[in-house]
Amino acid sequence: MAGSTGLLKGPTMDWSSNEGLYSRYKLWKQQCELLFTGPLVKVEEKIQCKYLMYWAGERGLELFNSWGLSADAEKSLKSYWTNFENALKPQSNELMSAWELHELKQGTMSIEEFITKIRNHIKEANYPADLHERFLRDHFVFGINSSRVRKECLKEGNSLTFNRAKDLAKSEESAERQLKIMGQGEVHTIRKHGKQGKPVVSQYKAEKSTQPTFHRQSSDKETVHSTCLGCGKNTHPRSKCPAKDVTCHYCHRKGHYAKVCMKKNKKVNELAAELPDNIDDVLFLGPVTTTPTNYDNINMIASKEKALLEVKISASEKGVQNQVVCKIDSGAETNILPRSLYDKLQPHPSLRKSTVKLSAYGGTNIPTVGSCDVYVQAPASPKPHRIKVQVTDADGPAIIGNITAQKLGLLKLNWSVKSDSSECTPNTQRKQHPYPITKEYLLKEYTDVFTGIGCFPGPEYHIELDPDY
């Protein structure tokens, strides 16, 4: 048995860093005891002590040499464990553990990881054993990401048990995972409600299209039977409809006006992002598209529609840097880091509670991971810069917004405007446009006008829209 090389290797104690050292020690001790009560159970205890010190490594031997054990103590495993505990166990602070339990939130942890974290804090806070289940239930409900689950728990009141709360959370987690799979490739619209309750619509697309999505909502009071499908007025016989012989400017079919054209009423999935009442500013996200992140030797990819840049992102100023392909979006007022990229940062940056709450169109809650600070270093920058990012579960590229891109020197706004007088001469040949001019034609012909945000030069313009178009 003593000559078995497999047993001689055994579990090695990890002394690489002081952070989390006691936790690693407890796991190492548990592994050793499994061997001592299993394959090495017939080995004499004094030989087991030799195995223990061999697995403890150089630092373990240094500690052993400082203990000054007697000859009898050197043959007892208990004396070794006692001295290791005295050397490695940090001073207990029940108040600190209780505070950490109070502040604990799920964040990016899974349900099981979150529960394990709560149990450890309860144990370290030294609460009475008969209250463990109560504290576990309460802090699980307090810290869970899903407000939908929390609402269901509150409905059950005092009859709620921890197992019931856990089942609700697991069901929600499974449903969200399935919805995410089903929703891949769909177009989403983020609607943010500001202090006045007025929605500001922006887009976060998950499909490979850079064209803006237009959404038209009908009034809740409007029904199919109350208005004519041809002209939009009160119901009347088809023979008396003024639009019966009219050609629609939108779909080019006869029998209805463009304002009631059914093809214009396309369904779009919406995410309602509600801001708290004390938030005055509303962030705008321009059109965002998914982009492959496995480019080789990318420095800069630019086109009329998009600008991609490979930057280095780290959790701290001198931390391990990750090569990430970001989108430089002049239409975005905030920076976005997908959760998949956040998980790659080591150690994970501390998450703060997000000021944005996301929910699906049907009312299904979409947990907001939160916001954090990361360090970004552009190719031409000598050192990384700290920026604030919103961590989201939505699929898509990392985004560097307008303000941050300017600070990093990645985006420069040129406000100079030149007027070409040759365009105003009588001899200039005007471009012939097709008739009738459709919305799709204008978007395609003047893409630069409908991309991003900005202002036209010159005085203010007054534009009147044809209600029948």
Image (cartoon, helix red, strand yellow):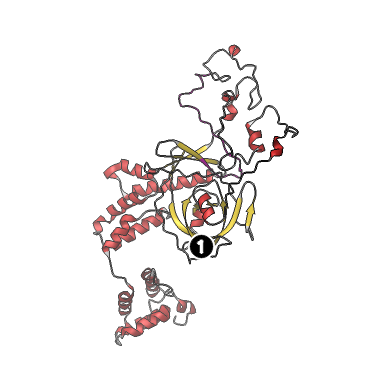
Q: Is residue 101 left or right of residue 444?
A: left
Q: Residue 256 in the image: state x and y as whole percent.
A: 61, 21
Res 430 → quadrant: top right
Q: Nearer the viewer, residue 226 or 89?
A: 226
Kindly state the secondary structure of the residue where label 1 is placed.
loop
Q: Residue 142 in the image: state x and y as whole percent.
A: 33, 50
> In the orientation shown, which residue stands out farthest toward the bottom?
71
Q: Nearer the viewer, residue 289 or 453?
A: 453
Which residue is tagged 1? 384
Give, as a single range, the part of the protein colored magenta: 202-227
**Which residue type carries mark 1?**
Pro
Q: Residue 333 in the image: state x and y as whole percent.
A: 50, 47
Give the crowd class for mark 1: few <14, some 14-19, many >=20 residues within 10 Å.
many
Q: Nearer the viewer, residue 148 or 451?
A: 451
Does the magenta stretch mainly form a helix, a strand or a loop? loop
Above or below 15: residue 198: above
Res 437 → quadrant: top right
Above or below 255: residue 278: below
Asked whether the viewer can see residue 361, the reply is no
Above or below 336: residue 420: above
Q: Residue at x 48, y 66 (%)?
A: 319
Is residue 207 a member of the stretch shown in magenta?
yes
Q: Is residue 365 left or right of residue 376?
A: left
